Every structure is written in structure tokens, then in C-alpha cells.
Image: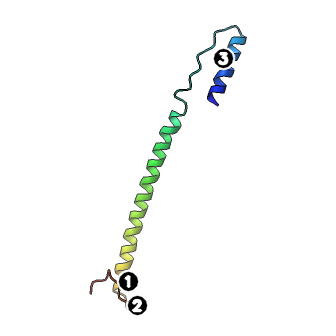
């Protein structure tokens, strides 16, 4: 897409009698790739933080259920 845009611009310059610019698409998408890395890193951080919090809440709920009278079946995480 970028190459086609540059070629079209070069054709317009030639039609006006000017010298066409060199077509260079080597850096195309660099900003997109850089931002994608940032967002992916943030997403990974968010998932790790969320899972860590969820694990802590689950453990707290398990430990709280050990002392309740409704705990009729033995649980391996409850200290006897």
C-alpha cells in the first residue's frame, strides 16, 4: 500500500517534469511494530497481575472455609 502511494506520487512528479523521488518502504510499519510490542507487554503484565490476585483470593477463601462449621468433608489444605 505504501509502495503504491509512493509510486503514484513519483508518477505525478514525472508528469510535472520534475525528477521522481526514490521509492523507499524499508521502515514501513516500524511504529506499528513498536506499539504492538508495548501493548503486548502490557497485556502480559495485566494477565499475570490478575491471575496472581485471583490466586490470593482463592487461597484466602479456601483457608476461610476450613474454620467454618459447613466444612464437613476433609480438605487437604486445612491443617488438622
| Quarter occupied by residue 57 | bottom left
Would residue 80 appear left or right of 40 to someone viewing this image?
left
Say the numbered circle drawn on residue 10: 3
Labels 2 and 1 touching (C-beta < 8 A): yes
Looking at the image, the residue that sits furthest to the right is: 15
- The residue located at (33%, 86%) in the rendering is 67
Would residue 44 appear left or right of 21 to someone viewing this image?
left
Q: Name the residue under label 2.
A: 70
Q: Position of residue 66 (x, y in %)?
A: 34, 84
Say the numbered circle drawn on residue 65: 1
- The residue located at (63%, 13%) in the rendering is 20
Spatial CA span between label 1 and label 3: 74 Å
Residue 43 to residue 6: above or below: below
| Quarter occupied by residue 9 | top right
Q: Position of residue 49 (x, y in %)?
A: 40, 59
Q: For numbered disc 3, what is the local secondary structure? A: helix
Q: Position of residue 62 (x, y in %)?
A: 37, 79
In the rendered image, which quarter contains the C terminus?
bottom left
Task: Tell which of 3 and 61 is nearer to you.
Answer: 3
Among numbered discs 2 and 1, the one appearing first in the sequence? 1
User: Dot 1, how many residues are within 10 Å of its Cα: few (below 14), some (14-19), or many (20+)?
Assistant: some
Residue 13 to residue 79: above or below: above
Amino acid at each position: 500500500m505504501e509502495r503504491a502511494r509512493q509510486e503514484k506520487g513519483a508518477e505525478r512528479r514525472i508528469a510535472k517534469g520534475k525528477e521522481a523521488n526514490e521509492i523507499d518502504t524499508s521502515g514501513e510499519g516500524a511504529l506499528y511494530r513498536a506499539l504492538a510490542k508495548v501493548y503486548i507487554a502490557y497485556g502480559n503484565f495485566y494477565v499475570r497481575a490478575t491471575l496472581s490476585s485471583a490466586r490470593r483470593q482463592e487461597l484466602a477463601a479456601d483457608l476461610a472455609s476450613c474454620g467454618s462449621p459447613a466444612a464437613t468433608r476433609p480438605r487437604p489444605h486445612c491443617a488438622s
